[in-house]
Amino acid sequence: MKLIHVSPRATEKAYRLLTAQNLYVFNVPLNANKDEIAKAVESQFGGTKVSKVTTLVQSGKAVRFSRGKRKNPGTTHRQDTKKAYVTLSEGKIRVFDTEEQKEEKK
């Protein structure tokens, strides 16, 4: 197995899923499979045990661009991205530290 790098997504939806369903959302490479993602999460964030991984590939949007004012309009596509929704059976990952810092200050 190859070693891959996963990075957590810090978005409002990811925060909502974390607090409501204990689901973590990660950006992963397009060629990574579920077993590789689970091993990468367990190795990068020690003390965690992955129970379930769900993946999806988000197609890149079409973007208009211009190589001149009216002469050569064109379209291109943004890159496709892959997301992984990971459920942990043991441990926690500290993605959103601001919530914990606010509690400590009070």
Image (cartoon, rainbow, N blue to C red):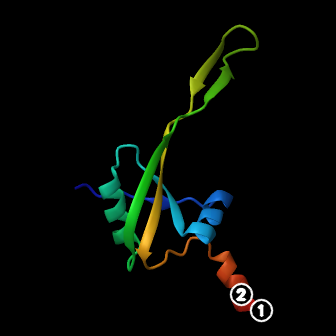
Q: Which of 61 and 89 is in front in this view?
A: 89
In whole angstroms, how far apart are the C-alphas of marks 2 and 1? 6 Å
Name, please, the residue furthest toward the left. Answer: 1
Q: How crowded is mark 1: few (under 14 residues within 10 Å), some or many (20 or more)?
A: few
Expressed as whole percent of the image width and height from the top left, the position of residue 45 reads 41, 73
Please give the residue where the numbered disc 2 appears in the rendered image. 103
Q: Which residue is drawn at 65% across and 64% down?
A: 16
Please give the residue where the numbered disc 1 appears in the rendered image. 106
Three-letter residue code for mark 2 = Glu
Q: Which residue is drawn at 58% across and 23% down?
A: 76
Report the quarter where the C terminus lies.
Answer: bottom right
Q: Residues within 10 Å of mark 2 (few under 14, many from 20)?
A: few
**Tag count in the figure?**
2
Q: Classify residue 92 as left or right of residue 64.
A: left
Q: Residue at x 52, y 65 (%)?
A: 23
Q: Classify residue 19 as left or right of residue 52.
A: right
